[in-house]
Image: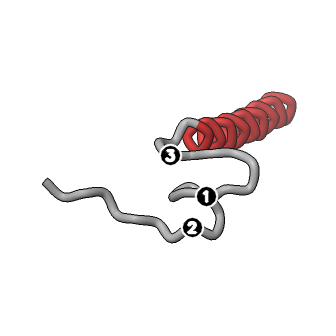
Amino acid sequence: MTILSALLALAAVAMMATLGVLAVRRDRDIRHNAPGATMRGTTVQGHAGEPSTPPAVR
């Protein structure tokens, strides 16, 4: 019975680690594919140093 408990605990730890890795990858993908996301030192709203202008309201 102790061996089965150890295997169950090992499976639980492996599942939690897998879920953690998948959550981090999902978060990274969401941030990477976010609308308006740019690279190389610019902010999400616009270029670094530029004031952001709100979108026009229709």
Identify the residue position indicated by label 1 in the image: 47
Q: Is residue 50 above or below residue 39?
A: below
Task: State the SS at label 3.
Answer: loop
As rendered, which of 22 and 46 lies closer to the eye? 46
**Could you give the CA–CA distance between mark 2 and mark 1, rounded to whole angstroms?**
6 Å
Three-letter code, disc 2: Glu
Three-letter code, disc 3: Gly
Callout 3–callout 2 Cβ contact below 8 Å: no
Identify the residue position indicated by label 3 in the image: 36
Where residue 24 appears, as percent x and y from the top left, is 68, 43
Q: Residue at x 13, y 53 (%)?
A: 58
Q: Residue at x 54, y 57 (%)?
A: 46
Task: State the SS at label 2.
Answer: loop
Q: Earlier in the sequence, mark 3 or mark 2?
A: 3
**Could you give the CA–CA distance between mark 3 and mark 2, rounded to whole angstroms?**
15 Å
Three-letter code, disc 1: His
Mark 3 neighbour class, 10 Å CA radius: few under 14, some 14 to 19, many 20 or more? few
Instruction: Determine which of the numbered discs, if any, sits on residue 50 in the image.
Output: 2
